[in-house]
């Protein structure tokens, strides 16, 4: 018994602290925040994203691998506004990690720093899986990315003062490049103004609002409920009255409802990358927006 | 602006010929004066317009500034909690009910080959209300989190299912818990029944942990968990409790039961996640009673005192394409249990004096189940249960004092059950389930066909999904 205990302790020690090079371990809830933090901090941090671009951040579980990551994290960067309510609270409370508890500098909810749209007037589950704080899918408006970037830069400096100068310099450089990129995207996307679209879930709202497009309906009958045949028929007659130009969805949403409605209504069904890694072109935040706008323009032709 | 310059141009054009044809000095002077006046009046108007333009620009800048101010105000406002009742605990309610069609009388249900645990059963016939569960949870302060789960049962009784506090980020991967809580042993035990993939507990949970058809194994005690600082998930847990629940019966001072467990888990690529573990549970029952019949069919109350040791191996493997479980996903789960009980068994017939004898048993059981979500909202599941009564040494029988028929429930038997289920979830918060089980648990050799229709609704705050 004593021998095996010794062996066990040795194995534990061998497994311990395998990655200790980076100054900070960051656990991002979604790929966009992972990419942004990496962009802002470079090699000073080791970033792990809890979800990939093919996963719906509403619906993952507090997997053992995520618990292990949360246990070792110095900073968690999440969307908040209850997007991760199904798993993040569990990760935080079971992690045994005091550095990332809500209220500490190691806990960052991006949606707290932007103006949220669609804050529900009526809180009732009969309205579907609504978010009391407002629509949490904030990242497809690049102005929001800029605001969150400023907050992340400050947090990184606070948590790792030794590298604060680097974070501030990188943050400043990013803001300049990002503002230039926004101008470029806004010029490029000018023809999309007023284009009516249908989306699968209410997760493109910030993009639509930014580009002045028009959201005329969703494939989901209520937020969070899978599309039904009856609702698709209603949408079809809606399209007859107010012809939508395209149907948008993310890579992780069921393709069948949008494809079937698109072929019936003879309009394109478009898969947008939605987040970093959502398709081959969307390798970072810049190419995410480049590709998103290209796909929209192409579908609008 | 355009109008003004046009007027000047016109004035200059008409003025030129006048100058050229003028042959009178005074006339010329008056024309000059007129032009001068015109010039002055236009200059005045231009000045006025320029002033207006400047004013307008200033106003625009002001508006912009106040707009950005408003935005900042909106941002701060959105970050602020709505009101004082934001401090109320998160409340959620589970409504659950069943309709069952059982071919055998549920009151005579017994699992053959094992000392009967508490609450053994298959549920009720016909319509019945399941456990209605009421849960309150909140952070207590920066250091603790509290949780209370009360179960309102169909017979109008109230049971405190769980009532615990837990440390919030004790650092170094440590978490401590105290109060009444579901033990962390095995896999299924920590999961509340309304989140199970089948209506009822595996047979192994019934005979080894005394959970009854729809319960969990819990203790009043303390728990300490530690997560290793590794990329591979590794969790060690230790618990001490009063041991009031089967396999213990809490008739002693101090610690009535303790448990140790180790769970390891991680991802395999994008699409697979797993967790496996081993657990050990020790209890010291003292006069743990069970009612049975002797060879003549007279009711007897036997009791066991000694120690009970249980070993559990558990695993769960989940698959979803690229980890995206919205459309399709699959879950494979299994647990194996092995129990050794050693001590004294008292045979208490009503008519005779108690007959004690040494008792030892080595028994095992397992279940394996798979649940497949083949399209959004719909899942299909299969489960196989099997127990093996293996070796049971009853001293009274070995020494020829009593015939084995005086312990009919302990005669060798291999209970089996096969279950299929189909469930439909209109949303994350509602579920309907149809389940059929072919149950060969009864030692009498009669098989039971068990049909179950179940609804589960969840109201209130959004619960988290345990792995």
Image (spheres, coloured by chain):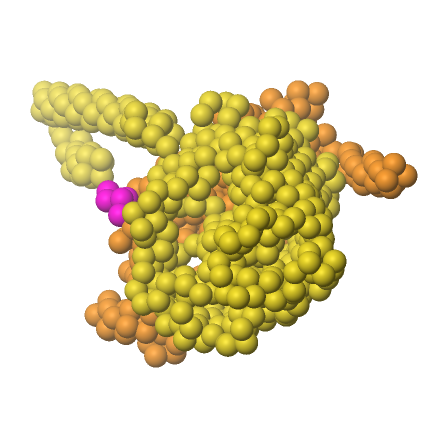
Chain colours: A orange, B yellow
- The quarter of the picture where residue A192 lies is bottom left
Q: Residue at x 54, y 76 (%)?
A: B445
Q: Quadrant of the C terminus of chain A?
A: bottom left
The one of A39 and A179 positioned closer to us in this rendering: A39
User: Seen from this angle, which residue lies furthest front?
Assistant: B352
In the figure, is residue B117 to the left or right of B133? right
User: Seen from this angle, which residue lies furthest right?
Assistant: A3
Q: Position of residue B218 (x, y in %)?
A: 53, 42
Q: Residue at x 63, y 69 (%)?
A: B413
Q: Is residue A2 magenta?
A: no
Q: Residue at x 73, y 46 (%)?
A: B232
Q: Position of residue B122 (x, y in %)?
A: 45, 63
The one of A199 and B89 positioned closer to us in this rendering: B89
Q: Is residue A296 above or below residue A66?
A: below
In the figure, is residue B448 to the left or right of A33? left
Is the magenta region chiefly helix, strand or loop?
loop
Residue B16 visible in this rendered orientation of the protein: no
Q: Quadrant of the N terminus of chain A?
A: top right
**Magenta stretch in the rendered image:** A120-124
In the figure, is residue B49 to the left or right of A136? left
Q: Position of residue B281 (x, y in %)?
A: 66, 44
Q: Residue at x 32, y 60 (%)?
A: B128
In the figure, is residue A14 to the left or right of B313? right
Q: Position of residue B295 (x, y in %)?
A: 56, 66
Q: Is residue A48 above or below residue B457?
A: above
- The quarter of the picture where residue B173 lies is top right
Q: Is residue B269 above or below residue B63?
A: below
Residue B55 visible in this rendered orientation of the protein: yes
Q: Is residue A123 magenta?
A: yes
Q: Is residue A295 above or below residue B255?
A: below
The one of B295 and B304 positioned closer to us in this rendering: B295
Q: How many marks?
A: 0
């Amino acid at each position: 018994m004593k021998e095996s205990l010794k062996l066990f302790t040795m194995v534990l020690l061998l497994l311990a602290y395998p990655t200790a090079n980076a100054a900070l371990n960051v656990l991002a809830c979604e790929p966009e925040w992972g990419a942004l933090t990496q962009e802002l901090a470079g090699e000073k941090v080791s970033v792990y994203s809890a979800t990939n671009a093919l996963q719906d951040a509403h619906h993952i579980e507090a997997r053992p691998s995520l618990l292990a990551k949360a246990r070792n994290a110095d900073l968690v960067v999440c969307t908040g506004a209850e997007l991760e309510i199904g798993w993040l609270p569990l990760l935080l409370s079971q992690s045994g990690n005091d550095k990332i508890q809500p209220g500490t500098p190691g806990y960052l909810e991006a949606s707290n720093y932007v103006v949220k749209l669609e804050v529900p007037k009526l809180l009732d589950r009969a309205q579907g899986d609504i978010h009391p704080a407002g629509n949490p899918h904030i990242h497809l408006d690049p102005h929001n990315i800029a605001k969150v970037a400023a907050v992340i830069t400050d947090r990184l400096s606070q948590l790792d003062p030794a590298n604060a100068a680097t974070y501030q310099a990188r943050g400043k450089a990013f803001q300049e490049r990002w503002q230039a990129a926004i101008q470029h995207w806004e010029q490029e996307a000018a023809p999309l103004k007023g284009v009516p679209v249908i989306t699968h879930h209410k997760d493109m709202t910030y993009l639509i609002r930014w580009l002045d497009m028009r959201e005329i309906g969703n494939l989901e009958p209520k937020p969070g409920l899978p599309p039904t045949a009856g609702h698709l028929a209603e949408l079809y007659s809606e399209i007859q009255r107010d012809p939508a130009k395209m149907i948008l969805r993310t890579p992780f949403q069921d393709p069948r409802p949008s494809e079937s409605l698109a072929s019936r209504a003879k309009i394109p069904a478009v898969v947008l990358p939605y987040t970093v890694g959502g398709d081959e072109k969307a390798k970072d935040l810049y190419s995410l927006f480049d590709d998103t706008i290209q796909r929209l323009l192409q579908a609008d032709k | 602006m355009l109008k003004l310059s046009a007027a000047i141009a016109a004035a200059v054009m008409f003025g030129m010929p006048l100058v050229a044809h003028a042959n009178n000095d005074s006339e010329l002077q008056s024309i000059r004066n007129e032009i001068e006046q015109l010039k002055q009046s236009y200059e005045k108007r231009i000045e006025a317009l320029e002033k207006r333009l400047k004013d307008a620009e200033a106003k625009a800048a002001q508006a912009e500034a106040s707009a950005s101010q408003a935005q900042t105000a909106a941002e701060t406002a959105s970050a602020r909690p709505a009101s004082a009742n934001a401090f109320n605990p998160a409340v959620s309610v589970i409504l659950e009910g069943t309709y069952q069609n059982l071919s055998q009388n549920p009151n005579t249900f017994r699992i053959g080959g094992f000392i009967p645990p508490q609450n053994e059963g298959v549920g009720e016939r016909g319509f019945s209300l399941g456990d209605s569960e009421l849960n309150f949870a909140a952070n207590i302060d920066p250091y603790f989190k509290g949780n209370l789960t009360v179960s309102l049962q169909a017979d109008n009784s109230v049971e405190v299912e769980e009532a615990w506090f837990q440390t919030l980020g004790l650092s170094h991967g440590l978490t401590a818990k105290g109060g009444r809580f579901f033990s962390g042993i095995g896999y299924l035990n920590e999961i509340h029944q309304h989140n199970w993939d089948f209506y009822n507990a595996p047979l192994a949970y019934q005979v080894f942990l005394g959970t009854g058809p729809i319960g969990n194994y819990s203790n009043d005690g303390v728990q300490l968990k530690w997560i290793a600082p590794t990329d591979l998930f590794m969790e060690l847990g230790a618990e001490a409790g009063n041991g009031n629940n089967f396999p213990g019966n809490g008739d002693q001072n101090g610690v009535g039961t303790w448990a140790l467990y180790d769970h390891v888990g991680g991802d395999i690529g994008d699409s697979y996640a797993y967790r496996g573990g081993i657990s050990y549970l020790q209890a010291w029952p003292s006069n743990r009673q069970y009612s049975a019949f002797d060879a003549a069919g007279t009711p007897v109350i036997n009791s066991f005192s000694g120690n009970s040791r249980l070993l559990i191996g558990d695993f769960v493997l989940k698959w979803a394409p690229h980890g995206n479980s919205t459309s399709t996903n699959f879950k494979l789960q299994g647990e194996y249990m092995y129990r050794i009980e050693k001590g004294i068994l008292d045979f208490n017939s009503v008519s005779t004096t108690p007959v004690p004898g040494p008792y030892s048993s080595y028994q095992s059981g397992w279940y394996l189940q798979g649940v497949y979500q083949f399209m959004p909202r719909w899942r299909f599941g299969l489960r196989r249960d099997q127990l093996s009564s293996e070796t049971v040494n009853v001293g009274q029988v070995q020494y020829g004092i009593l015939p084995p028929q005086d312990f009919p429930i302990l005669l060798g038997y291999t209970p089996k059950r096969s279950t299929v289920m189909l469930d439909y979830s209109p949303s994350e918060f509602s579920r309907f389930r149809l389940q059929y089980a072919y149950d060969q648990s009864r030692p009498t050799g009669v098989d039971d066909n068990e049909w179950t229709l179940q609804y589960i609704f969840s109201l209130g705050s959004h619960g988290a999904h345990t792995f």
